[in-house]
Amino acid sequence: MNDRNQIRRWAREQRRALSPQQQQNAATATAKHALTLPEVAKAKTLALYLANDGELDPEPLLHSLLAQAKSVLLPVLHPFHQGQLLFLRYRPGQDMSANRFGIPEPVLDVQQVVPTHAVDVVFTPLVAFDDAGHRLGMGGGFYDRTLERYQGPIIGLAHDCQQHPALPAESWDKPLGIIVTPKAIKRFRC
């Protein structure tokens, strides 16, 4: 299985096959691992995402970070730059709306936008990952374009079942330094 779309289908089937209880247990275990990372401990502003299509749910991590008085950001589709994201401060109970992909995101408020260079850590969803830290996303390139010049840690969150032996990498693919799963913290040389 070397075709990127074939791998995407396989990995999405794997994560969708997890029961709600398995999903919840995975989210809790992954949050516990992520909170032990020194990069997370020293960070003040962290970007997360809201789970969709069986992605590992970062909600337990989000609540733990808020309890530590850290600033949590969520992605919003950029209204003017096609294929890019903005990161907005998240506040529990704020207005949310579904974007064109049906994914909830904060209602755009320019006063809540945080420039990417001011984000200490970015947690990213992924469809599949490999033994070298390569990340395969949904194929839209939103995170790739948005984080192209980002210098901080980018941490992937995934179910263990999403690991593939070797993903076909493209020239624009930037390996992740860290991927956190329910069973482990995986560090890679980038």
Image: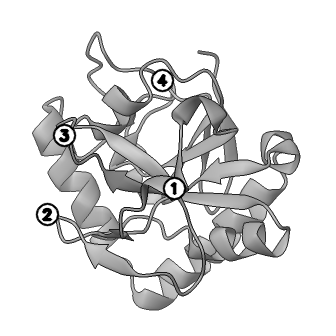
Q: Quadrant of residue 152?
A: top right
Q: Mark 3 and mark 1: span between their CA atoms?
A: 30 Å
Sequence-wise first label, 4 or 1? 1
Residue 139 badge: 3
Nearer the camera: disc 4 or disc 1: 1
Task: Identify the residue at horizontal 19%, vertical 40% (top origin).
Answer: 140
Q: Mark 1 and mark 2: span between their CA atoms?
A: 22 Å
Residue 53, x across and y down, in percent = 27, 69
Nearer the camera: disc 3 or disc 1: 1
Which amino acid, by three-letter code, is at mark 1? Gln
Residue 175 badge: 4
Badge 3 crowding class, 10 Å Cα cut-off, few under 14, some 14 to 19, many 20 or more, is few
Task: Identify the residue at horizontal 23%, vertical 47% (top origin).
Answer: 138
Badge 1 crowding class, 10 Å Cα cut-off, few under 14, some 14 to 19, many 20 or more, is few
**Image position of 52 with respect to 163: above or below:** below
Which amino acid, by three-letter code, is at mark 4? Pro
